Amino acid sequence: MTEFQLTPLRCGYVINHAVGSFLYRTDCGDARIDAPCIAWLLQAPGQTVMVDTGPGSCTQAPQHYRPGDPDDLLLLELARHGVDPSSIDTVILTHLHNDHVGGAGHFLNAIFHVQERELREAVWPVPFQRPIYEVNQRGRTPAWVQILDRVQALDGDGVIMPGVSTVTLPGHTSGSQGVLVDTAAGPHLLPGDLIPLRENWPGGGGPPIPNGNHTDLYAYERSFLRVAALVTSLGVTVLPSHDPRIFDQPSYPVIPTS
């Protein structure tokens, strides 16, 4: 079995975001956070995979940068880990919102794995989703349009390579998917924005809570049931997509020190 190490990369922020916006119908008072936009670097011997690509550069997505941030956090993070984006040939996108796909143009030699249903949704989403897909926005070309010639459209769950597979998890968007990754400590799930914070998936501590930004609560409930089944059957570890506490560890699973 191929076992990967997962490294979170901080690629920007959803700045001054109301915590309650992540937790549907939950009273969080006036709590706000700079929620990190997280891309994931998956590494195993002879294999490097990206999951999501953040919002892109400060020039491209200034709303996701804070004063004093460098111009391109994703490139800086990849360089810090000694990774040349041109060497990566596999990128999986959980969905096509601009804070997850904006940096895709850096991966010039990659094939991008996206659910076909998400591609259809991105072309003409419901009106409140159009700004975050960057469609119907005069003068803007969505980042996902620029990689369409290298997209591998998926129809449901699929194996990308040994140790990495996709799991359809609609609800946040109609074509959202998670990424299931084998590690030395068992499988880990990157659920995309189905689960942005730990509070959305408290496990045995209470019922799951949908993201306030969603398109279909019926689909959301079915996706939560899928995650629960994966946790029960495989002992999956769930890693939220926008939680600052993800960076309490430099990578997953923890590498023991000798």
Image (cartoon, grey):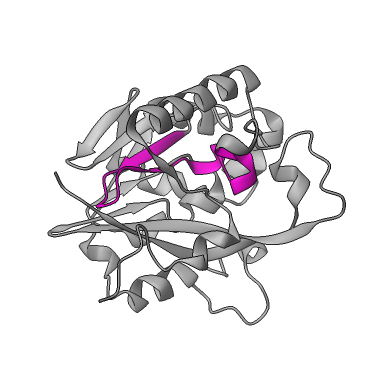
Report the side of 29 relative to 13 (left or right): right
Report the side of 167 relative to 191 (left or right): left
User: Relative to 216, is 55 above or below?
Assistant: below
Report the side of 20 relative to 41 (left or right): right
Q: Position of residue 197 (x, y in %)?
A: 61, 48
Q: Is residue 34 magenta?
A: no
Among all residues in the image, which is located at the extreme top? 218
Residue closest to the eye, 109 or 186:
186
Q: Is residue 193 magenta?
A: yes
Label total for image? 0
User: Relative to 57, is 173 above or below?
Assistant: above
At 56% across and 31% down in the image, what residue appears?
173
Report the side of 24 relative to 46 (left or right): right
At 63% across and 66% down in the image, what residue appears?
62
Residue closest to the eye, 227 or 38:
227
> Can you say which quadrant of the picture contains the N terminus?
top left
> Can you say which quadrant of the picture contains the C terminus?
bottom left
Q: Position of residue 171 (x, y in %)?
A: 57, 27
Residue closest to the eye, 114 or 9:
9
Quadrant of the image occupied by residue 179: top left
Q: Position of residue 232 (x, y in %)?
A: 41, 28
Q: Which residues are magenta?
A: 177-203
User: Relative to 196, is 83 above or below?
Assistant: below
Among all residues in the image, which is located at the extreme bottom? 68
Quadrant of the image occupied by residue 194: top right
